[in-house]
Image (tube, rainbow, N blue to C red):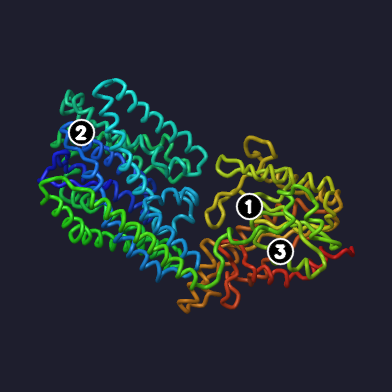
Amino acid sequence: MHEQKRPPAKAASQVPYQAHIDGLRAIAVLAVVADHIGLPGFQGGYVGVDIFFVISGYLIISQIVEGLRTRSFRFRDFWSRRALRILPPLLLVILVSVGIGSVVSVTSGQFHELGQEALSAALMVINQLLLSQQGYFDVASQAKPFLHLWSLAVEEQFYLVAPLILVGLAFLANRWGKLATGLIALMFVASLLACIVLSQDGKGLAFYSMPTRAWEFIAGGSLGALLPLGRRLSRPTVELVGIAGIAMLLACIFVFKPTPLYPSYFAVLPVLGACLLILAGLLHPASFVARLLASRPMVAIGLVSYAWYLWHWPLIVFTRLYDFSRPALLPDTVAALVALALAVLTHFWLERPILAWRRLRRTGLNWWPAVAGVGITVLVGYGAADIGQRLAAAAPNAPKGVEQMGDAGACRIEAMQGPGACLALVGKRRLGLLLGDSHAMAAYEALAAHATASNSALATLTIPNCAPILGVTSFEIREEHADCTAGHKTGLAVIAGQNLPLKYAVLYARWNLYAGNEPLIDQHDRELLALSGAKEPAPDQRSLFIAQLRKTVLTLRQHGIDKILVVAPTPEFEEDANDCVLRANKMHLGSDATCSLPRAIVDQGRKPALDWLSAALAGIEGVRLIDPLPVFCDADRCSASDQMAPQYRDKNHLNRAAEERLLAHFSADFAWVASPAL
């Protein structure tokens, strides 16, 4: 992806310059940038990264093999050249991005994430950081300015291990040639199979990991060994090979769609297409496709492709953040063009001078560029992280993210080993149950304070992404939330065994997540429900929801819970509502109006959940359903702020102030449920 070749001054371990490879780089970077700005038709542009991996595999493996063949390969020379090629533009982009991000960010969470991502990007481990967070195609990931550097981290990890493996294989090949060939084939097959298998859960392990991407590098690296066979092909056949390669890549770019199941076997097509294009150009540089790729415009874009790749995504992200996280084609395109201009400057003022200095040396490089590069990288990374931490500490104290909501109290019945500790804590107070998902977790502190004021206490059964419907689990993509099944089983045993004197219950959840058929307003896929133990979601989601929620309520009442309060869905927003309010206030735009949605949109998103809830609870005594919409909406709009104060933690979780407003508005209902009087 990032090794750049220029015609003269060929070192002993270099392979001859091939202009069509720069043209192939141009296709890759144009595809990625077009996809990232949302250019219609380029929804599969993310395959450009696969193309880069193939190019790197061909160039790096060929260089090492040639160096080993001529006995000119030196580890110090290889890694120092990598450091001089990769690190200067990367560290420049990281420093500038941290500077811009320090101005554009508004929340403590954003400042903290900026520093952590910059550190991980500098240390080339950001793929591991992202693996622990959202997937590449998740909406939340699109606000990460260093998201795109996962691919550079994968490449750098490949650069670290490739020479070690190839030196070992060369040693084996001198004695047992067939064994070395077999090991190469085994690594390719193992990596590809792991890629396919691990892609199935949609969690990103196959996407972000170097071992599951290694087969793409190996595919590119194998092209040198295929050249003798390829030279037997006629000129017309090579022309067809090149046309087939470009057709495969264009099909991927224009037909593929974002999916958390990528790369899997889908990546075979762009990898094969890139291999065919490289091979066709190597066999016949004068072939039609090779000449097209080697044209001046394509080569020019290819030469700045690394710098453009580095610059484009941070500028797009910061443009969107400044515009309240609203992707739009025109400003995103302008950001990408500014990035191209910066890439050209970076190429001429930074990359080419370093390359010229390298060419002046008649001998290979020693260790100092690699060692110095590592040292400077560590300083930049930890410096950026420190800046992020300092800015986060000085930012408005507005919690961002579900992870900052606390542990849902001391009486967590889904994790309870025995009732003793909870009973001792409760004493003689009336005990209620908070049953729900992460929305209930967000509400816990306010509800617990209200319970204490009412001389009662709250036990909790709150599991993120799990509907508060006992005996039901949920599926996201193809993966079952095992925590739902286990937690509900434990909770039901506690309730049925009457180990705790539960007298009332509050059901609080992101009901929109479990009802209806369309994606949510933030484009999050809905959770699909199934009976516990089922291998796949139920075909009739509405019937299951209504029947099992009704059964849950009746079960609670059967085991001594005489009153149940169900909180209907709260408004949800397309983008981070907390960020919107703080940004609007900072820009003096008026957050109550700026950070709001038409009520008609909110009503449409809540309609299935309200219908299903009403049907499930109809006719059951001791149950009340309250609708929080009047707390946040007037007749026309629903706002994310109250008198310019944030009401949300993120897109859909209320903060403590909003929960207290809700409690105050429905004080009679919350007093009813917690009171011993009927």
Residue type at tag 2: Leu
Which circle marks residue 156 in the picture?
A: none
Q: CA distance from mark 2 to mark 3?
A: 72 Å
Circle 1 packing at 10 Å, graded few (<14), some (14-19), many (20+), is some
Q: Is residue 191 left or right of residue 668?
A: left
Question: Looking at the image, is mark 1 or mark 2 earlier in the sequence?
Answer: 2
The answer to which image quadrant residue 354 occupies is bottom left
Q: Which residue is mark 2?
A: 68
Residue 137 is situated, as x and y percent measured from the top left of the image, at: 45, 50
Label 3 residue SS: loop
Residue ID at (23%, 44%):
76
Question: Looking at the image, is mark 1 or mark 3 earlier in the sequence?
Answer: 1
Residue ID at (83%, 52%):
500
Residue ID at (44%, 56%):
142
Question: Do the CB atoms of the residues marked 2 and 3 lie less than 8 Å apart?
Answer: no
The answer to which image quadrant residue 457 occupies is bottom right
Label 1 residue SS: loop
Q: Which residue is mark 3?
A: 627
Residue type at tag 1: Pro
